[in-house]
Each structure stands twice: as structure tokens, then as C-alpha cells.
Amino acid sequence: MSLSPQASNLNSPVISSPGSASPLLGRSLESLTAWVQAQGQPAYRGKQLYQWIYQKGARSLSEVTVFPKAWRQEMAETSIGRSIQHYRAIASDGTIKYLLQLEDGQIIETVGIPTAKRLTVCVSSQVGCPLACDFCATGKGGFQRHLQPHEIIDQVLTVQNDFQRRVSHIVFMGMGEPLLNLDNVLQALHCLNKDVGIAQRQITVSTVGIAKRIRQLAKEELQITLAVSLHASNQPLREKLIPSALRYRLPDLMEECREYVKLTGRRITFEYILLAGVNDRPEHAHELANLLRGFQTHVNLIPYNPISEVDYQRPKSRQINDFLAILEQANIAASVRHSRGLDADAACGQLRASRQLTSSEGS
């Protein structure tokens, strides 16, 4: 693992929202054209600005060399809305994890995951997460605030610029619960699709399940993939792992998922983290098969990526394979998703937590 620190403060105070000035990132071509005209510039500069932001990844107006120098200097304080790279960890498999500092000093994580044919970005939707799932490093760190649309889009452009390669896929599986920040996530999603050029079918939104929000998402009539973080095959076990399950019970979640499939015609992916001795037994696999029988689904089995805050362990290969075999025998589509970047603190919240600890120890 290669680590590349840059000066920044991980212990910034909690700020509920970023500054009031509206950044340029996230705006449409029409909006940018109206903005340049309001600054006394000709309309065609709107298209130039649009290309420099979304295609060239400009981080400030001073970089837009097709603009007159005098105007660039005049508008030097105008925010495009890009983050600062605070920290960068490179894993042996080529995965790169970033800590990005936002304009208010908050720190978020994003991950670039390359393969020969694609480049996937795992984006965050919140600073921290309020759901406090028992096995999740992000949940252990608490919640700060929602991310604004430009702060979500910036993560994708940061990875694209760093890899010097077009991003092909996006997964909302980083820090936070996307459906608790649905309006901003939807704005970012539409921009990523229309302006950055990533097909909706290549975008996945992951949720632990928020009452009525899956139904709300269905009504948007998007072609994205919905991934539901299930992680348990029955209500008592889910309550132990996911505190919010106390308020949004498993039968209600499954009813809303079935309605989503009916409304959209899109299958749902169910994420199931396998925790050794907790939810990986044959009886859990049979329960899960019964729970999912009868509608369009795919199960991603994810062997646990251990964190220091809890004692959960990764199952042995035999347990993983036996669990998968039971699902397949029950005609439930399933596969094992092996984690990338394990030597770069790739579990959500791990790198941010480890850097906070390092920063506090050094102060």
C-alpha cells in the first residue's frame, strides 16, 4: 500500500451545511450559459465552461484558458465546487481510496476500482452515517451532514482525473445512506448521467431500507440498479445488526421491494454481508431463499471485511460456498462479491477513521 498525505485537518468542527454560494459544478449547460451571460460574457462561453468542467475536469476558472485572462482574474474567487485531495491510499490490486476535504473542512471517502474493462467509483452520499449499523466503520464515526449534489459529482470527476481514464460505473455504496439524502442524490445522478455521460444502467444506488423512500425512488422511473443491504434473513437478527430495522421491519421492507420491481420492471440486488457464526449458517441461507422467492432478485454475498471496532470475522471459504450452493439450489440468483483494496482500508469508513486516529495521536 502506498500512502500520500497532504496537509489538512481531520478534526474540523461539525458544520450542518456548506457555504451559501452556489458552485458551478452540477449545473446544466443552460444554467452555465445563463451564468456567464449574467457576468457580461457572450453565451458561447457557457458551452466552453461546460466542457471544461465536465470533460476536462477544471478545478478553478483560472484553468479555463479559453477565457480572457482579465476575466479569469476577476472571477478568481468563484467556486467551481471541487474538493481537495487530503489523502490517497493505493492497494496492491490497483484500487485507490481517497479522503477528500470539502469546502467546510469535512472529510469524505471515495474509491476508484479499476479492471481491464471498466472503472467504477464508489461514492459517498453523506459525511458519516446516522444509521449506526453494528458492523460498519462509517456508522461508528457518527453523522455530520448530507452531501450536496456537487460534492457527489466531484468524487466521480476526482477519480476520473486521477486515473486519466473514463469512469464507466458508479455505485452509491460509500459513506452514508443515499435514501436519507434522496433529493441531492437524484440531482447528482441526473447530472452524472446527462453531463458526465454515465449511463443510468451503470449506476447502482445502495440502501439499507428507509420507509417509503424505495417507493419514492421507483416513481422516478430511472433505469438504475437498486441494491438493498439486507444482511439478515429474519427480523431479530436484522435488528441486532441494523438498528433502523426496529422502525422499518423486514416484512414491510420486502413489500416495498416487491412494489419497486412491479413499478420499474428492474430486478433488485440484495447485499448480504457474511459474518462468521452470525448470519452464515445453512438455516440462514434457507431463510433467505424463502424470503426472496417469487420476484426478480439477485443476491450479492459479501464476505466481511473486518474492522477494529467490533469482533465480527470473515467466514471460511467452505461456509461461503455452502451458503451460495443452498441459494442456487433454491433457484435464487446469487454470486460472491470479493472485496477490493483490502490492504488500503477499503471498508466504508476505515481509512477516514484510521486517519482521524493518527491525527489525534499526533496532536
Image (cartoon, helix red, strand yellow):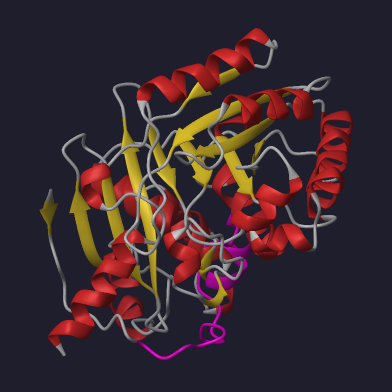
Quadrant assignment, res 53: bottom left
Q: Is residue 168 above or below residue 206?
A: above
Q: Quadrant of residue 356?
A: bottom left
Residue that appears at 56% across and 60% down: 133
Along the line of sight, which residue is nearer the eye, 22 or 299? Answer: 299
Give the quarter of the figure containing the C terminus: bottom left
Q: x, y percentage for residue 298?
A: 64, 24
Magenta highlight range: 12-36
Relative depth, front residue between 318 and 215: 318
Residue 76 within the magenta-colored segment of the rendering: no
> Can residue 42 be seen here?
no
Q: Is residue 72 above or below residue 217?
A: below
Depth check: give the residue in front, 95 or 165. 95
Q: Position of residue 237 (x, y in %)?
A: 66, 48
Q: Is residue 174 left or right of residue 362?
A: right
Residue at 32% across / 37% down in the picture?
A: 340
Q: Is residue 13 magenta?
A: yes
In the figure, 346 relative to 281: above or below? below
Left or right of residue 260, residue 51 in this image? left
Residue 236 image position (x, y, % from top left): 72, 51
